[in-house]
Image (tube, rainbow, N blue to C red):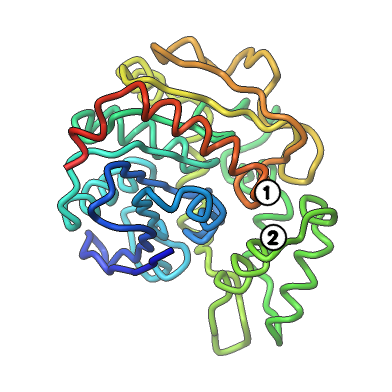
């Protein structure tokens, strides 16, 4: 499958994005990633959907967009997505967001509704339950735990980072070629060694907006396109899920036309970073695509 990359001018720097497939594709997918992730998490989906054009940015403060400076926050990510579509000459896309990328997708659909044909929220996008008795300054560690600590780690060799992820609870039983490539891409060279690319300042700014502030709840009410929420039954450490099975307290009722899919036997990472998990995502994309006029309006 063809792959190319683009660098797009945005406020604060240049946004990097990877693109799989042809610009002549009738199915166009815009895919923002999670809070400490990068665009290569979508490689399994790209392999499953060679007929689609998948546009996947490294969000500001991550991957090869690490040096993009402030402003941070979900709305700025949404504006970056608009700039990316404008640069590529794409009018409308199916928007598929994983984890924090789901929240970015909601804000994008609410603020730029003419650019979105449908939404797929993959274990993200519905407000999280705020940890009890946690101050705002401690939200990163309380919510992300080891994922946040990892950003400060320095590795002497790439193989050491691979070994770190092989022991991660989410991948002990599913460390595949996609995870290996994703992990390798994540490292950047620094004066002290190899370090994960996620910029902690960007992560801190974004995570404060994941718990259902009034503005976000109001924007959920603005979503009118067909929307699917795919829930993973296990969380970041292959343990407790991010979302209750009944979505109690996550305000799912605020999005009109929301359909919930409870996936089986995946955690928060493997729902995208495995072929089996990505088959669930691809199936929902294809279902939405067949029910919409996105093929006629994608350009």
**Between disc 2 and disc 1, whose residue precedes?**
1
Mark 2 lies on a secondary structure that is helix
- The number of callouts visible is 2
As drawn, is 252 to the left or to the right of 53?
right
Q: In this view, does 152 lie above or below 98?
A: below
As drawn, is 18 to the left or to the right of 198?
left
Q: Residue at x 28, y 68 (%)?
A: 6
Q: Where does the image place residue 5, in percent across and percent down from the top left?
A: 33, 69
Q: Which numbered disc covers residue 29?
A: none
Q: In this view, does 168 lie above or below 32?
A: below
Distance CA(mark 2)–CA(mark 1): 7 Å
Dividing the image into 4 quarters, which one contains the C terminus?
A: top left
Q: Which numbered disc covers residue 149?
A: 2
**Is there a contact, CB below 8 Å, between mark 2 and mark 1?**
yes
Q: Residue at x 47, y 67 (%)?
A: 63
As drawn, is 101 to the left or to the right of 243?
left
Residue matched to label 1? 141
Q: Where does the image place residue 288, in percent across and percent down from the top left?
A: 40, 26
Mark 1 lies on a secondary structure that is helix
The front one of 27 and 98 is: 27
Q: Is residue 192 above or below residue 282?
A: below
Q: Where does the image place residue 259, in percent across and percent down from the top left?
A: 50, 16
- Report which quarter residue 59 is drawn in: bottom left
The front one of 255 and 196 is: 255
Q: Which residue is drawn at 37% across and 38% down?
A: 95
Q: Residue furthest bottom?
A: 191
Q: Which residue is drawn at 66% across and 51% down?
A: 274
The front one of 264 and 13 is: 264
- Report which quarter residue 37 is drawn in: bottom right
Q: In this view, does 132 lie above or below 184?
A: above
As drawn, is 250 to the left or to the right of 88?
right
């Amino acid at each position: 499958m063809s792959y190319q990359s683009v660098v797009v001018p945005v406020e604060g720097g240049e946004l990097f994005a990877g693109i799989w497939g042809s610009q002549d594709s009738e199915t166009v997918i815009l895919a923002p990633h999670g809070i400490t992730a990068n665009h290569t998490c979508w490689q399994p989906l790209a392999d499953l959907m060679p007929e689609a054009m998948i546009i996947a940015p490294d969000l500001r403060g991550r991957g090869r967009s690490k040096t993009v400076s402030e402003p941070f926050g979900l709305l700025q990510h949404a504006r970056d997505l608009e700039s990316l579509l404008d640069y590529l000459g794409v009018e409308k896309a199916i928007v598929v967001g994983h984890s924090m990328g789901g929240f970015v997708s909601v804000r994008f659909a609410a603020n730029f509704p003419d650019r979105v044909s449908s939404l797929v929220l993959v274990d993200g996008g519905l407000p999280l339950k705020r940890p009890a008795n946690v101050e705002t300054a401690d939200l990163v560690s309380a919510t992300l735990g080891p994922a946040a600590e990892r950003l400060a780690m320095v590795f002497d060799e790439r193989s050491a980072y691979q070994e770190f992820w092989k022991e991660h609870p989410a991948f002990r039983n599913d460390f595949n070629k996609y995870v290996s490539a994703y992990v390798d891409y994540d490292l950047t060279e620094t004066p002290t060694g190899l370090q994960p690319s996620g910029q902690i300042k960007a992560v801190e700014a974004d995570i404060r907006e994941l718990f259902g502030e009034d503005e976000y709840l109001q924007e959920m009410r603005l979503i009118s396109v067909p929307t699917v929420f795919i829930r993973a039954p296990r969380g970041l450490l292959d343990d407790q899920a991010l979302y209750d099975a009944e979505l109690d307290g996550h305000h799912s009722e605020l999005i009109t036309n929301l359909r919930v899919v409870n996936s089986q036997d995946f955690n928060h990472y493997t729902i995208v970073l495995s072929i089996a998990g990505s088959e669930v995502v691809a199936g929902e994309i294809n279902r939405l695509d067949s029910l919409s006029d996105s093929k006629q309006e994608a350009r």
